[in-house]
Amino acid sequence: MKRFQSIRWRLQIWYGLLLATVLGGFGVAVYRVESEGQFRRNGEEMQRRVQVLAASRHPMPNAHPPRQQFVLQPENTALFDQEDGAGFYYVAWLHGGDPPIYSKSAPRDVPMPEEMASSGQRIRAEFQEVFFTPAHGDCLLVGHSLARDLGDLHRLAAWLVIAGSAVLVLGLIGGAWLVHRALQPIWDISQAAQKVATGDLSQRIATSASGSELGQLVNVLNSTFARLDTAFTQQARFTADAAHELRTPVSVMLAQSQDGLGSACENDEHRQAFEASQRAANRMRRLIDSLLELARLDAGQEPPRRHPCDLAAIAAEGLELIRASAAQRGIQIHAQLAPAVCPGDCDRLAQVVTNLLTNAIEYNHEGGEIYVATRCKNELVELVVHNSGLGIARGDLPHIFDRFYRADKARSGQAGHTGLGLAIVKSIVQSHGGSIEAMSDPGKGAIFTVTLPS
């Protein structure tokens, strides 16, 4: 059904219906004009022959009472009884009770017209007949077989159907080409917009119809894409520059804090102040490192290296790293790691696994569980991380990969979190041509699924 929701298919269907209606109407009109013309020509020929028959009546000499006799002149016999089967015949009924006079090709079962008007015309089976009553009791009839005419009309109808079908097929092919040409700019716009939506802001739409309405739309969209590209580039540059500039004062703060802690502090209050400064500086350093990493991913400065990576092995290493943290909170780990090889940067993918496993521990209940699985599915590889923790509210779920987004107070209150971990994970996965999805119900944990091309 989606196909018939397409503008291209709807235009093609309406165009086909309109063309079929026009061709059908034209064919019917041609057939009716030809059939009516044929009947009219036959009627005119028969009227002419009836007048010849009327002139062939002569008074019978010495007849009492007076009667008419029918004598067809030799020069008029050629008008009847042609041997080609498409000629004309006649039947004459004369007053006085004599048998009807038939021409050679006239059927012997021709009935005398019941309505004795001065003249008339009738269709009887496959015969077209015209009759004339020159006097009371006399009737002259000229007939014509319609067999050949009907055959010609049937052949004409067949040729009209064949020609109309051929024109319809050619018209549909030509219409499909025209519709394709007309909608191609829309297809190009859609493709470019999809690539821009996935982060490729360098896309531009090429069009040859710059003066048309679609050409003007393309120019507006290209201008919009260029502004977006410039804005995001400036934003990424600003983020990177700001992070670089902040690194130096943060390093100084850390150095001074360490020196202060290493020296003989006058009292515990001073020591606590140095420790708080050191914690804040470490948190700021992690934030700056995350911002720099996101800026590099956004700018594509570090495209992922392409080497065969086994997600199962990477997940196993990540589990060993977080096993001690899980044991401290009594969290049990369940793993089903089937081989799942894909091309990519193993270090970057390890960062994805570590971030997801760390979140699965930090946002879990005491004594909770974590399920980790890798598998191959339809030429794709999947990594699934499921915890039995707090879960994510449905209103927060669409935003958890946004930068600096905090889902709830429980998350925002935990120290050491920058709100950039899942954003980094998504950027790394997308740079590998994959996708990440999250599913959750509050109180039932969360499931993160990473899908990568194999």
Image (cartoon, helix red, strand yellow):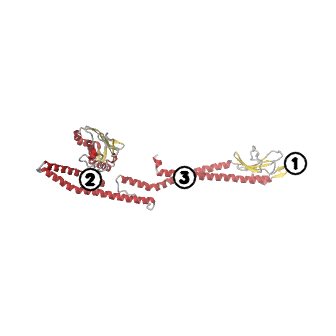
Tell me the amino acid under the disc marked 1.
Answer: Pro
Camera-side mark, 2 or 3: 2
Badge 2: residue crowd in 10 Å (few <14, some 14–19, many ≥20): many
Which residue in the protein does label 3 denote? 18
Distance of mark 2 from mark 1, alpha carbons? Answer: 131 Å
* Count of marks, rendered view: 3
- Residue 325: image location, x then y, percent: 22, 41
Badge 3: residue crowd in 10 Å (few <14, some 14–19, many ≥20): few
Tell me the amino acid under the disc marked 2.
Answer: Leu
Is residue 100 found left or right of 195 in the rendered image? Answer: right
**Circle 3: element type:** helix
The residue that appears at 18% across and 54% down in the rendered structure is 253
Residue 291: mark:
2
- Residue 102: image location, x then y, percent: 77, 47
For marks 2 and 3, the one nearer the N-term is 3
Residue 65: mark:
1
- Residue 317: image location, x then y, percent: 25, 42
Camera-side mark, 2 or 1: 2
**Circle 1: element type:** loop
Distance of mark 1 from mark 3, alpha carbons? Answer: 71 Å
> Which quadrant: the C terminus?
top left
Whether residue 302 is visible here, answered yes or no, is no
Whether residue 395 is visible here, answered yes or no, is yes
The residue that appears at 87% across and 51% down in the rendered structure is 61
Seen from the viewer's position, the closer of residues 315 and 91 is 315
For marks 2 and 1, the one nearer the N-term is 1
For marks 1 and 3, the one nearer the N-term is 3
The residue that appears at 43% across and 54% down in the rendered structure is 187
Camera-side mark, 1 or 3: 3
Tell me the amino acid under the disc marked 3.
Answer: Leu
